[in-house]
Image: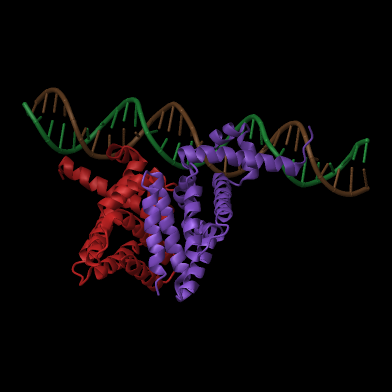
Chain colours: A purple, B red, C green, D brown
Amino acid sequence: MRRSNSERTETMRGALIRAARGLFIEKGYADTATPEIVNAAGVTRGALYHHFVDKKALFAAVIADEARKVSEEIESASAASATARDAILDGTRAYFDALAVPGRTRLLLLDGPAVLGSDAMRELDEEYSEASLKAGLRELFAASGKAPDLLDVFTDLLAAAFDRAALAIEAGASRQDYERAIAVLIDGISVK
Amino acid sequence: MRRSNSERTETMRGALIRAARGLFIEKGYADTATPEIVNAAGVTRGALYHHFVDKKALFAAVIADEARKVSEEIESASAASATARDAILDGTRAYFDALAVPGRTRLLLLDGPAVLGSDAMRELDEEYSEASLKAGLRELFAASGKAPDLLDVFTDLLAAAFDRAALAIEAGASRQDYERAIAVLIDGISVK
DNA sequence: TTAACATACATACAGATTGTATGTAAAGGT
DNA sequence: ACCTTTACATACAATCTGTATGTATGTTAA
């Protein structure tokens, strides 16, 4: 069968990313060797190093994919909420659902920051999942007549709290407790 | 000179931990090789692998040291504050000061969780730095007549926010803005 | 259509790294 | 003084990563 180059590239990159994703989740970035990855994908290391400059670049592709999926799931879930408060809390639940997909907390919250740096992860977060939170907070501030001068800071702090909550929930903590506490935090910052 | 074995062990472990700390901060855990570490310490890899089962164990020793120091600095700073609110905010500032020591955010917030796992780091945090925050929150809740049923959860969420703030401040954000926002969060959860 | 080139992938190789095995010297107990 | 244990150094085997090189397949233009 004759396949175009762009098609070959696309399927090969997809296969490598999928195989790498599984192993990175299972054993972590550091303990996953490139021979394992290409074995799982049924190819050789030549393909990997042709499509990615190094192992870290492959990891970055996995992370970017995952961040995009999380963002998409959140946005598709937070369709229409009655109030700004509800929009934020619905978004929070959608975020917890998205991070409940096995391995995502490890990829996005543990290995990602260590391997790619917190700056790179911050950029990804801002580009993807934090956008809707920030929009929600902006509305909330507007509705409660609060000055939005610390909007970015509150977004950052709450995003960090959500991340920690996702980690705790995965470790066995009560999701309901964390959702209640987050609701208290949201209500707390919306008082004038 | 004749030195006892326990004395030799202590100085050697200290030298290895100090050398490793510097390199882990400078280049990260993954990019620091054990030959470099022992070179910096002026010994051989034999000494390292005699005192630590592997590279990760040496890293764990560095992290434990650092977490203890942070905890000590916080406790020595938060001597006596007028109110529970002040105690928490003073503790927050002390935490920011402690994490402003170069490399600590990388050690404790980036490499630590990735290398040792978030469970291990959570245990360290609970044993050390989060204890005073939890005590402060308990007082705050008592003073404002709030039910303390979510005390652990709020402690966790706020600790995560503090960590993110420390990272942001190191990346160049306004420390004052983050302190103001944190004060708002604290005040928000203390309303009945 | 085919010669010329670029892209996709495989194989081979060099350097470096980790952990272990083994050897030696110093300390501790009897 | 002897024997055991601990502290450390050296030597070795098994990886792993990135690069260099080789081959096949796709692309382009005369």
* Image point (21%, 46%), residue name: B10
* Image point (54%, 54%), residue name: A74
Q: Position of residue B154 (x, y in %)?
A: 33, 58
Q: Is residue D3 above or below residue A73?
A: above
Q: Position of residue B120 (x, y in %)?
A: 33, 45
Q: In the rendered view, does B136 fall on the left or right side of B104?
A: left
Q: Is residue D1 above or below residue A56?
A: above
Front residue of D10 and A126: A126
Q: Position of residue B14 (x, y in %)?
A: 25, 49
Q: In the rendered view, does D14 fall on the left or right side of B83?
A: right
Q: In the rendered view, does A6 fall on the left or right side of B54?
A: right
The quadrant in which residue A150 appears is: bottom left
User: In which quadrant of the rendered image does the C terminus of chain B lie?
Assistant: bottom left
Front residue of A142 and A6: A142
Q: Is residue B110 visible?
A: no
Front residue of B143 and B103: B143
Q: Is residue B47 visible?
A: yes
Q: How many marks?
A: 0
Q: In the rendered view, does B114 fall on the left or right side of B47?
A: right
Q: Position of residue B61 (x, y in %)?
A: 29, 47
